[in-house]
Amino acid sequence: MKALSVIVMILFPFLGIAQSAEELYDKAVKSIENEKYKEAVQTLTKAIEAKAKYKEAYNQRGFAKNLLGDFYGAIGDYNIALEIDSTFADALVNRGDAKFNLGDDYGALEDFDKAIKYDPKSAEAYTSRGFAKYNLEDLQGAYFDFSKAIELDPDDADKYFNRAVVKAELEEYISAIDDYNKSISLDPSDPDVYNYLGVAKYNIGEVEEAVKDYNKSIEMDATDPVKFENRALAKSTLEDYEGALADYNKSIELFNEDPDTYNLRGVVKYNLENHEGAIEDYNKAIELDPYNPVYYDNRALSKMATEDYKGAIQDYSYSIELFPTDPETFHQRGLAKIQKGDKYDGCLDLNTAVELGSEEAKASVKEHCK
C-alpha cells in the first residue's frame, strides 16, 4: 500500500503538467485580448516548458512579442513553430507581419504567399499581403488582395477602407468613395475614414461635401493636425480664406514642424493681402525645408506685392538653383527684373521661359521686350 501511494504521487504531477499547458495557453490568450502582452509572454513560456513542441504556444508568444515591438524575438518564435509544422499558415502570416514591421517587405511577401498556399481561405493573409504589395508600390496587386480579403470576410470595415485607399491612389475616386461609405456603414466610429472620404470627394470637385466630411472627422477627433489642414485646403478652394486661416492655425498649434502647413498658411495670408504675415510663414517653411523651390517662389510673390523686387529676384534665383527647368520661375524673375528697371536681364529671363515652353512668357516678351 505504501508503494502504491508513492506511484500515485509520482504520476499525479505529470498529469497536472499535461493539463496545465493548455490551461496556461488559454490564460495567455486572454492576457493578449486584455493587452497584457508581457504577462502573456511569461505565461506562454511556462506553457512551452510544460509542452515542448507546442506550436500554437510558440505562435502566440511570437504574436505577443510582435505587439511589444520585439520583432526579432517574435520571428524566432515563429521559426520554431514552423520547424514543428512547416504548413502552419497562421504562423506564416504572423512571421510575415513581423518582417513587414522590420521593413522587410519582400521577406514578408514570401511568407504571405506560403500562408495563402496552405490556407487559401485566410482573409488576413490576403490583407497582410496587400499591405506588403502596397509598400512595394504594386497597387494593382494590393487592389486584388484587398478585394480577395473582402470576398472572404465581407463584414470587416477595415478591409473596405484598405481597398479604398488603394483605389484613391489609382485615382479611382468614385469607386473609392463607395468603399469608404461601405466601411462607414459597417463601423461609423472611425474618424479617419471620414477624413479620407473627404479627400476623395475633394479630388472629384465635391469640395463642399468634402468640408462636411472633414467636419465630421474633426468632431470625432480634434487632435489630428492633418484633418484641420485638409479642411483648410478645401475652405481655401471655396475662397473662405478666414476659415482656412483658422484651420491652418489649429493645425500648426497641434504640430508646428510641418513646412507645407506654413507654406499653405502663407498662401492664405497672401490671398488676404497680409503679405508680411505670408512672408513670415514662408520664412518658417524655408527654415524647416530649405530645398523646396515652391517656398521661394511663393515668398517671391509676396515680396513682389510689397515692391521688394530685389528680394523677389533673389528668391526666384534660389528657386532656379533648385529647379532650373521651371519656365514659370524664369518668367516671374524676368518680370521682377523689369519692375526693378533691369529690362535687358529681365528679357533674357523671359526668353528663357519661352524656350522652356511658357506660353504666358511669349505675351510678356511682346509686351516688354520690343
Image (tube, grey):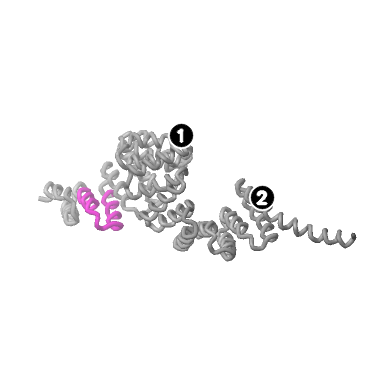
How many numbered marks, from 0 up? 2
Is residue 206 part of the magenta span, yes or no? no
Closer-to-camera residue (290/238): 238
Residue 219: assigned label: 1
Residue 27: assigned label: 2
Left or right of 300, for residue 249: right
Left or right of 260, for residue 321: left
Identity, as a three-letter code, of the amino acid under mark 2: Lys
Q: Label 2 crowding class (10 Å Cα cut-off): few <14, some 14-19, many 20+?
A: some
Secondary structure of residue under mark 1: helix
Res 78 → quadrant: bottom right
Q: Where is residue 16 in the image (x, y as percent from the top left)?
A: 75, 56
Res 215 → quadrant: top left
Q: Where is residue 113 in the image (x, y as percent from the top left)?
A: 45, 60
Q: Can residue 322 be seen in this view?
A: yes
Secondary structure of residue under mark 2: helix
Q: Which of marks 2 and 1 is nearer the N terminus?
A: 2
Closer-to-camera residue (317/17): 17
Q: Label 1 crowding class (10 Å Cα cut-off): few <14, some 14-19, many 20+?
A: few
Identity, as a three-letter code, of the amino acid under mark 1: Glu
The range drawn in magenta is: 311-336
Alpha carbons under labels 2 and 1: distance apart: 39 Å
User: Residue at (65%, 56%) from the top-left corner?
Assistant: 44
The single residue placed furthest to the right in the displayed view is: 2
Q: Position of residue 70 (x, y in %)?
A: 57, 58
User: Residue at (18%, 51%) from the top-left corner?
Assistant: 358
Q: Where is residue 110 in the image (x, y as percent from the top left)?
A: 46, 62
Q: Is residue 102 visible?
A: no
Closer-to-camera residue (233/118): 118
Principal SS element in the magenta part? helix
Q: Is residue 233 above or below residue 140?
A: above
Disc 2 or disc 1, which is closer to the eye?
A: 2
